[in-house]
Amino acid sequence: MNSHLLHVKELQTQFITDEGTVPAVDDVSFYVNPGEVLGIVGESGCGKSVTSLSVMGLVPSPPGKITGGEILFDGKDLTEASEKQMQKIRGNEIAMIFQEPMTSLNPVIKIGDQLIEGVRIHTDKSRKQAKEQAMDMLQKVGLSRVDELMSQYPHQLSGGMRQRVMIAMAFICEPKVLIADEPTTALDVTIQKQILNLMKQLNSEMHTAIILITHDLGVVAEMCDRVVVMYAGKIVEEATVKEIFNDPKHPYTKGLIQSVPDLRQRKDKLYSIPGNVPKPGQIKSGCVFAPRCAYAFETCGQEMPKLCSTEGSQQVRCWLYHEK
Amino acid sequence: MLKYTFRRLGALIPVLIGMSILVFLIIRAIPGDPAQTILGDKASEQAVENLREQLGLNNPIYIQYFSYMKGLITGDLGTSIRTSSPISADIWPYLAATIELAFVALIIAVVIGVNAGILSAWFQNSIFDYTAMIIALIGISMPVFWLGLMEQWAFSLELGWLPSIGRESVRDPITPITHIYMIDTLIQGDFDQFVVVIKHLFLPGIALGTIPMAIFARMTRSSMLEVLRSDYIRTARAKGQKMFVIVYKHALKNAFIPILTVIGLQTGLLLGGAILTETIFSWPGIGRYIYEAIQYRDYPVIQAGILVIATIFVLINLIVDLLYAAFDPRIKY
């Protein structure tokens, strides 16, 4: 079990607010192996981003706090690591790219300097060497006129270019794990495709494990090896990509897949799961999905089911499969 | 950039003309006759009338204004009614004294205020944050004259560490070159005198710098808090950068534009609004110069003093505008 590169065990992250404690992430476990692409899927507000920030040790604190579980990376528990130890890991061993390429780069620092900074934090290379490495990396992510680019500021670049810069920045220290938090959400469809291809290519070239956080099942189908489906701060299903699309078990996963429009069938109305995602901590007893679930029965409203294995590696948190 | 600078300098002309008219009219609206003030209550009607004629005070107001403007264009700020000497020559020593004092006050205010603001934002809601912000609030609310008197009482009278008034030792005056004594003593290589100058600057510098310091601290804190929450700061942290570098490099450069604006405004106010401090510390600055001129109804001096301060104020704001571009590459002129 401990041989996984990154293994999150029963992670619990809470936000302490004036209205009480909100469990944004509750009992979340998953792992990635070198070179693997893991997808974390779910609607907005289901705890995907908080999970990734927890791994990086970047949960805004206060009000956020990791209150339980372990994050094992190379055998070390990151929840126990000091800020100084985390600084050595961030960007160097675990890197992250964010949803908003427009605001994620510092507007008053040149692109080149932002890349060079990343190299110089983690290595003792000279500025010149770091500069060469930065230019190499920019070329690798498919940017041209690299020389000019190095002395430009973020506002002079398009969204797609900025996300490429972000990717270059994330990969520049050849991290073992890359966490990509909705990296293509803010981009045009054509650019999305390019960015995904680029990540896939770097993944196979550098053997970097990728945790891809997204709400887009199309992206999952294209990119991922395994998928974790999250709902209201909890994992409701975990499976390989094939299993998820061919045989989704959890009613929520089924709903998600059903809501993707199918080009081959023209329907009058698109399917959507009735209701809204509950706020974290809103549902006190029973299964968090029960109020929106078409299959819910008596037990669902009373007790939260545990994550249990079905066939193969597939795991599901649902009373429908509990007794089997 | 150069074109912009010239355009802005050109735009100063109507501003300055408007200001000169305003100052000219307001002063003449104030009751009181300068001729009467100069000659005293017991002067005869005839003597007062003669002096009025001599000073040109009997001319229609627009004639007075035009003769004043004619002088201004040739660099002549007029002649003091009281001392009969040209103001252009008189004013510099006073202005230099004020510039020196304002400079010291500004350095104190920026160094302490901005850093306190940065640390307060970095360690938001910590004891440091609360303490600094309470001190800042007290600093903003504290009247300068009271603070000045307390300083004199504590550091001069009780402790005897620092001189309470003036710019220099009365027994051993400084030979002026530029009239900015810090520079003068250094040029003359007289380090002992330099220390004397610094000692004299200390108390009034703190008194004058306290309010701007408090304003800078509060402004910096709120500006930094906003920046520290932004996405690019998260990116910098995700890179593994140290908090110190993130705060002082990544965040401060972004937060500095609003800080720069208040620094500019406060610098203008320091130069013009030092009258209270200058009075308490017997500082021979421009504030005192104008204050005394007002007492004597010395119109030309009041006009010239206000005009000089206003011009400096406008110029400082121009410099601030130009500096924006240095801090934010998105601003282009």
Image (cartoon, coloured by chain):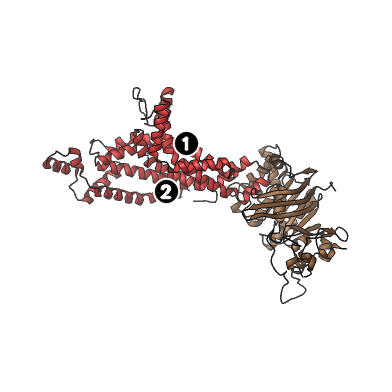
The chain carrying label 2 is: B
In-image side of A107 versus A122 (left or right): left
Which type of secondary structure does the marked residue at label 2 adopt?
helix
Cα separation, mark 1 vs mark 2, equals 32 Å
What x and y, as percent, mark residue A309? Answer: 86, 59
In-image side of A214 versus A33 (left or right): left
Q: Is residue A140 visible?
A: yes
Nearer to the camera, A223 or A8: A8
At label 2, the amino acid type is Phe
The quadrant in which the C terminus of chain A is found is bottom right
Which type of secondary structure does the marked residue at label 1 adopt?
helix
Is disc 1 in contact with disc 2, using a CB cutoff of under 8 Å?
A: no
Question: Which colour is chain A painted?
Answer: brown
User: Looking at the image, which residue is at 51% across and 47% down?
Assistant: B257
User: Looking at the image, which residue is at 71% across and 70% down?
Assistant: A274
Q: Which residue is mark 1?
A: B108
Say which mark, if any, is on residue A5: none
At label 1, the amino acid type is Ile
Nearer to the camera, B243 or A280: A280
**Mark 2 Cα within 10 Å, few/some/many (few <14, many 20+)?**
few
Q: Which residue is mark 2?
A: B6
N-term mark: 1 or 2:
2
What x and y, as percent, mark residue B215? Answer: 47, 44
Question: Which colour is chain B painted?
Answer: red
Q: Dividing the picture into quarters, in which one does residue B202 lie? A: top left
Q: Is residue B77 visible?
A: no
What x and y, as percent, mark residue A147? Answer: 64, 47
The chain carrying label 1 is: B
**In the displayed structure, would residue A36 be above or below residue B191?**
below
